[in-house]
Amino acid sequence: MKIGIDARFFGPRVGGGGLGRYVSELVTHLQKIDQRNQYILFLKKENFHECKITNKNFSKQLIDIPWYSIEEQRKMPGIIARSKIDFMHYPHWNIPVFSKVPFVVTIHDLIMLELPHSSHASTRHPLVYGFKHAGFRIVLENAIHRSKHILTVSNYTKSKILEHFGVKTNKITVIPNGVIPPREARSVSLTALGVYQPYFLYVGNAYPHKNIEMMMHAFSQFHENHPYAQLVIAGRRDFFSKRLEKEADELGLNSENVRFIDLPTDEELAALYKNASLFVFPSRIEGFGIPPLEAMSYGTPVAAANTSSIPEILKNAAQYFDPDDIEALVELMRQAADEPDRFTNLVKEGERLAESYTWHKTAKMTLEVYNNQSLL
């Protein structure tokens, strides 16, 4: 078979932490295990050379078209049709509506449906956001109903797809994400990053559903009795993270107390994970959630919200708290700082759990879907 993959999200630098990582690791590991099928990887200019070909059955094609754009809908169907592929794999819901080529789609979450329709979740004017949301619904419904098969990353997201769209349960295959094995970070200086111990760590974007404001309020209370502790927030600097910086200032927390690290490298992330007293994951809604598993792989204890897919993925390897219970998170921070031995068994369980999520398994299960002729 000749398979196309929309790899425009390839790499965390271009596609963002979770989705960019998913695409790059899937492509990398498919090249290691599939010697039979032919592949065309459609890439943007920014990541065309970043994607390395290691398997003669794989080739690259430049398709420098922004996602979520009119151009995506207008131009991609023709480009894909001319490539003469048997089917496409779209790793996200932004499918060209008028494309006639059969496709498999990965739906990571339905956060835009689960969140309240509010301008607070967007940088746009409420009216513009309304049009954007309506367009999202049209494209998503097309992806769900016209796809030959749906891949998703958790049973939680599968249940939400069934709830909102009523497709047959056997049309959906749950394939969990993987975790990259721990890296060495000998050349990274925390001091150079403006980070000092003890510190609590969050890694990811700063979208409203991530509930970072609640974490900052908890840290503000904790900080009153632990003035030398630090909160580190690592991710892409954007409108939402700038809003958090303003929130920190209003709480009386300066840049020494709350440290924002913009787009850390993999080596910097390794150092941040390894030396944190506690990794905090306060998100209200997640389709999967890779960062807490990465933290576990470095032997760092994890405190996470007890919502959506998070308990399904992290199992009994995390301490859980209600995402609205500030006092509960303050107490977990206190325990991590003052009684770290409480987390010894949790850390061991976390390391075992993280090892069970591999990108090799993700690619192998995905390839099984590709090769199932009855699905396509």
Image (cartoon, grey):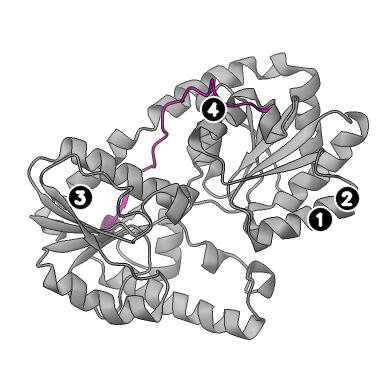
Report x, y in % for residue 286. 54, 51
Q: Which residue is mark 3?
A: 369
Give the quarter of the figure containing the C terminus: bottom left
Report x, y in % for residue 320. 66, 36
* Residue placed most toward the observer, 220 or 76: 76
Q: Which mark is residue 247?
A: 1
Q: In this rendering, would 207 be left or right of 231?
A: left
Count of numbered circles on the image: 4
Look at the numbered disc 2 and give the secondary structure of its residue. Answer: loop
Mark found first going from the N terminus, 1 or 4: 1
Query: Residue at the spot x=22%, y=42% of the render?
Result: 30
Report x, y in % for residue 184. 48, 22
Kindly check if marks 1 and 4 are in contact, taking CB atoms under 8 A apart as contact. no
Observer able to see residue 149 = no
Q: Is 228 above or below relative to 244? A: above
Kindly check if marks 2 and 3 are in contact, taking CB atoms under 8 A apart as contact. no
Between the C-alphas of marks 1 and 3, the distance is 46 Å
The segment highlighted magenta reads 170-190
Kindly check if marks 1 and 3 are in contact, taking CB atoms under 8 A apart as contact. no
Look at the numbered disc 1 and give the secondary structure of its residue. Answer: helix
Q: Which residue is mark 4?
A: 296
